[in-house]
Amino acid sequence: MKEFKPEDIRNIALIGHAGVGKTTVAEAALFSAGESTRLGSVDDGSTLSDYNGDEINRKISINASFLHCEWKSCKLNILDTPGYSDFKGEVTGALRVTDTGVIVVNSVAGVEVGTESTWRIGKERALSGIFFLNRMDKEHADFDKSLASIQDRFENKGAVIQFPTNAGEAFDSFVDLLSMKLVKYEGDGSGKFSVSDIPAEHKAKADELREKLVEVAAESDDALLEKFFEDGELTADEVTQGLRAGILKQSIFPVLCGAGTKNIGLKHLMDFLADYGISPADRPAEAGTTGSAEASRECNIDAPLSLLVFKTVSEAHVGEMSFFRVVSGKLQAGTEVQNTTRNVGEKIGQIFLMNGKNRKEVGTLYAGDIGATVKLKDTHTGNTLSTKQDPITLSGISFPSPVIRIAVEPKAKGDEDKISTGLHVLHEQDPTFLVNHDAELAQTIISGQGELHLDIVVKRLKEKFGVDVELVEPKIPYRETIRSSSQTQYKYKKQTGGRGQFGDVWIKVEPVPSGGGFEFVNNIVGGVIPGKFIPAVEKGIREALEDGVMAGYKVIDVRVSLYDGSYHNVDSSEMAFKIAGARAFKQAFLDAKPVILEPVYDVEVMVPEEYMGDVMGDISGRRGKISGMDSEGPFQIVKAKVPLSELYRYSTSLRSITHGRGLHRRKFSHYETVPGDVTKKIIAAAEEEKENK
């Protein structure tokens, strides 16, 4: 394979809602370019990109697959991304290293909530976008309705490049507004097509849309706009110039159409990407740091070498494979590099181009290109590799926060260490999967993007590390505090025949503002308690704070003042005063209107309007409080505060309520008093657990 310079490379991510046909589009593109000998199918598990066993069985994309082909003197690097929100991390990593998002839309449904959520990630990276209205061959396919949803959601930036002449089951033809010709595909999967004049019945629509296209191309450049106003027309080269400028600055989102399963329109999509798509050379320099100073790298072959690793996977018989983009310079096999993120040296062995699981070894990759390598010792997703002489740490990848948490327990005794090791390795490969051993709750908590995401993680844990775990509901990190003040005395006195134990303390407990933590105030005067025993009193109280009083949960936001007491010259000891302090605190705590606090989360739910009522009703049923509502195009955003205890498997429930069209995100907000009836249940559950132990 020949070597490509930055200006000849097109890094493309196929993104969009689940089930719109992204993998089929990728398959048709590779078949059209001659990278495969047959048109694979998702249904029979024969596509190049969905090669993982879980993907084949479930008939969905789980991983972002790296594919490539040559087309019109350009190299197309294609990242086929999952549409399910459970695998949003794969989309995030892929979009970090691509320059153009091909937004695949189901022409029956139009823009869906998953389209919007994935484009949000692309928008943050200032990617250019191109729409491909897929499934034009399906019953009820509606180009105009789908276009209207694009214009509504993308600020009227959609620019029609093609429109179908016979959408529906007979679809095989569209008008191309760049050539002003009718394109007719054979529709047998071969990708063969013929070109002819536009039929009379479609000429008026073609002329109208062509005029709009030329106008938006002119608006992207002041000189072109001036010429357009003077002459009323632009040359073909000027239209190209205007379109490329508009695509680059995201003021134009071209709209093309086709049918992936029949390989209709894919050659024209690839032509458009080659002619109008954004190259790495068009993008601004990558930001980073050198030491504490800001730095950047231009996408230039002559610049110092730097790479960004955007994905790591463990492949059977291969080991850990690292996928990267060459941000600057030139990479050759055998190059010694520095992992500036972790400050370790690495050596690049073989360099591969991938088509799914199929590897092709190459000797060199230039700036802007994407490749893979194996057997790096200590390099993971988001790390930067550069030369030791010119180090730089590039800005990493901002992965989404978890939306679900579940506890794991070993099915077999003695597997704890293997489970811990395996889960941490899986986290290194997938940063959207988090693992945390919560000592307070005595549970290992795993968190991720959805129930399916965690199911896949647990399956990989069993396959790769040979350990089985059970998923259980995680405990909630409740807190205990007080709402009023109280005073008490506790005298600890014990006589055992020899030296006894004696400690006498008087304390006052009172609440402090939320977030105030714990304050211990020593108000002893006159030596009624010797100074050497004061720290023991505080230690006893601190231990009582950790153990809790009502239901065994940590006590927060209290002030304890030690103001009186007495001691015995012989029998008093640090242990006696520690016990007295702990017991006095528990007694005073129970007299100060104690309450249990629960963690409350800010939740944002994004849904089509027709599900608003059901979603809001469900939130209310979870003791949630609606804090606001907003809209984004055809979608509604419900903002609420919901107790963490009511969010267990919420992502699954939301998917069921909205038929897969609802998404949510959450983050911790604050602690709030638990209602009385819930408090009783928490205390009862704690007592039952104590008895069982």
Image: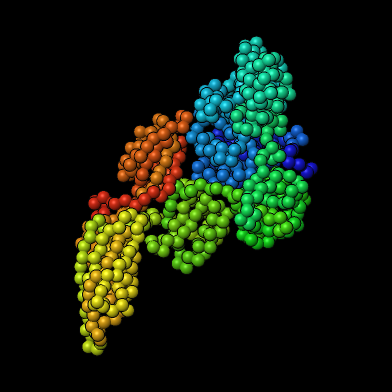
x, y percent for residue 388: 71, 58
* Number of numbered tags placed on the structure image: 0
Residue occupying image coordinates x 34% and y 65%: 546
Q: Position of residue 600 (x, y in %)?
A: 36, 49
Quadrant position of the N terminus in the picture: top right
As drawn, 229 above or below 489: above
Residue drawn at x 43%, y 46% is 666
**Residue 309 showing in the rendered view:** no
Please tell me which residue is depicted at 54% across the width and 29% down the height of the picture: 154
- The residue under the point 67% across, 18% down is 228
- Between 236 and 205, the one lying in front of the other is 236
Q: Which image quadrant for residue 56?
A: top right
Q: Is residue 457 left or right of residue 573?
A: right
Q: In this view of the protein, which residue sits in the foreground, 39 or 636?
A: 636
Q: Residue furthest right?
A: 2
Q: Residue furthest bottom?
A: 498
Q: Is residue 226 visible?
A: yes
* Residue 279: x %, y % from top left: 69, 37
The coloring applied to the image is rainbow
- Measured from the top left, where is residue 659 in percent x and y? 44, 36
- Residue 670 located left or right of residue 253: left
